[in-house]
Image (tube, helix red, strand yellow):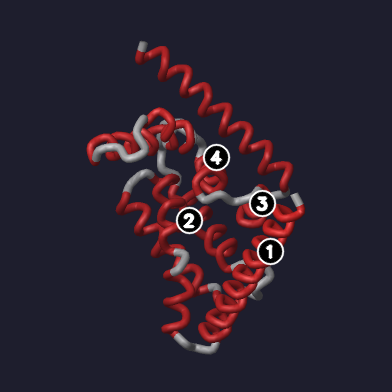
Amino acid sequence: MQGIRAWRAVSTTIDEGVAADEAAAEAALLRAGKAGDNAALERLLAQHEPSLYTLCLGMLRHDSDAEDAVQETFLRALGGLSRFRGDAAVRTWLFRIAVHVCLEWKRARRPVRLWSELHQDAGPSFPSPEAATLQNLRLLEALGTLLPRHRAILILKEHQGWSIAEIAAALGWNDKKVQNELYKARRALTEWRERDAREGA
């Protein structure tokens, strides 16, 4: 047991060290960007682009809309860079902007299940291209039935793996509100799942 605890302690220390190094590197890019280094700004934003795209796609359901939303997020971030004091992580700041961009667009949609539930239904770990495409379309259809704020919370929690505290910081809410809204979102997905099962019977 002592060996396991020691190994976990070393692993935790290593993880914390890596996170600190990444935070320091990001802070350096941010300082350089504020000083006018465009290459540093591009590197800073590019490392968050894939996860931002996933968030926007989940909320807006269309590739082109998600791409446009990411670009709008970057434009707003660049416009507000001088006012960003670094109180929050760059990732949190960018996701907050992206959520607001997507909410402003207010696309009408219809709801689905959590990623884990959909992947469990998918069967093999490595589905065929056709099965993977259908699975992704079903996921987007499901998310579309949720309120925009619920889509945002589920994507951040279930797909991005954010903590309640991180989501609260990104949305400007307190932890209790995030937990309440997450409960409502999951309940809505459960109701959708039950309707879907009845219709497919």
- Quarter containing the C terminus: top left
Where 11 falls versus 138 (above or below)?
below
Q: Residue at x 61, y 56 (%)?
A: 170
**Residue 111 visible from this viewpoint:** no
Q: Which of marks 4 and 1 is in front?
A: 1
Residue 39 coordinates in the image, percent (x, y):
42, 83
Using the numbered discs, state the Cα–Cα distance from disc 4 to disc 2 in whole angstroms.
Answer: 15 Å
**Residue 127 visible from this viewpoint:** yes
Using the numbered discs, state the Cα–Cα distance from disc 2 to disc 3 in whole angstroms.
Answer: 17 Å
Q: Which residue is drawn at 55% across and 39% down?
A: 150
Residue type, label 4: His
Q: Nearer the viewer, mark 2 or mark 3?
A: 3
Q: Which residue is drawn at 69% across and 66% down?
A: 13
* Numbered label attached to residue 135: none
Residue 179 coordinates in the image, percent (x, y):
68, 39
Query: According to the image, label 3 marks what residue?
Result: 168
